[in-house]
Amino acid sequence: MKRTSHASVRAQQRGIPPIVVDLLLRFGQIEHDHAGAEILYFDRRSKRRVESYVGALFGKLSEHLDSYAVLANGQIVTVGVRYNKINHN
């Protein structure tokens, strides 16, 4: 999926590896923000799916599993690290 330059810069600034963004796209839970965008994040179920997919690499990636990505217009708009719960509307 295409990433905006803003998303690439934010991922680098926040230390989020590209593989984590790819795992978000593959396994992440989707929540709509009711403004036309979607938020992808790892919930308990998706973390278990990532663990079974990556195997021993999970220990290295686990510190990044509080990351999220925002998708709009078929692009990754931004990425970040969650400090609060995602509101389920």
Image (spheres, rainbow, N blue to C red):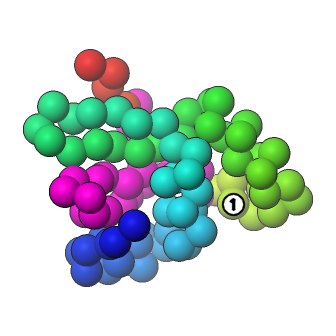
Task: Indicate whether 12 appears above or below 19.
Answer: below
- Quarter of the figure that contains the C terminus: top left
Residue drawn at 35 percent across, 77 percent down? 8
Locate residue 62, reporting x and y percent. 69, 53
Q: Nearer the viewer, residue 61 or 75?
A: 75
Per the image, label 1 sits on a secondary structure element best described as: helix
Q: Which residues are magenta?
A: 64-85
Task: Indicate whether 49 appears above or below 56.
Answer: above
Res. 63 image quadrant = bottom right
Outermost residue, top direction? 89
Locate residue 61, reporting x and y percent. 69, 60
Res. 35 image quadrant = top left
Taking the image as drawn, is residue 61 in sight? yes
Residue drawn at 85 percent across, 55 percent down? 55
- Quarter of the figure that contains the N terminus: bottom left
Locate residue 70, reporting x and y percent. 30, 52
Residue 42 falls inside the magenta stretch: no
Residue 71 falls inside the magenta stretch: yes
The image shows a total of numbered marks equal to: 1
Residue drawn at 26 percent across, 58 percent down? 74
Q: Label 1 neighbourhood size at 10 Å, few (<14), some (14-19), many (20+)?
A: some
Res. 6 image quadrant = bottom left
Outermost residue, right direction? 56
**Is residue 58 toward the left or the right of residue 8 in the image?**
right
Residue drawn at 40 percent across, 72 percent down? 11
Taking the image as drawn, is residue 59 in sight? no
**Is residue 47 toward the left or the right of residue 7 in the image?**
right
Task: Indicate whether 44 appears above or below 4.
Answer: above
Could you tell me the amino acid type at mark 1? Leu
Residue on which the image places disc 1? 61
Locate residue 67, reporting x and y percent. 48, 53
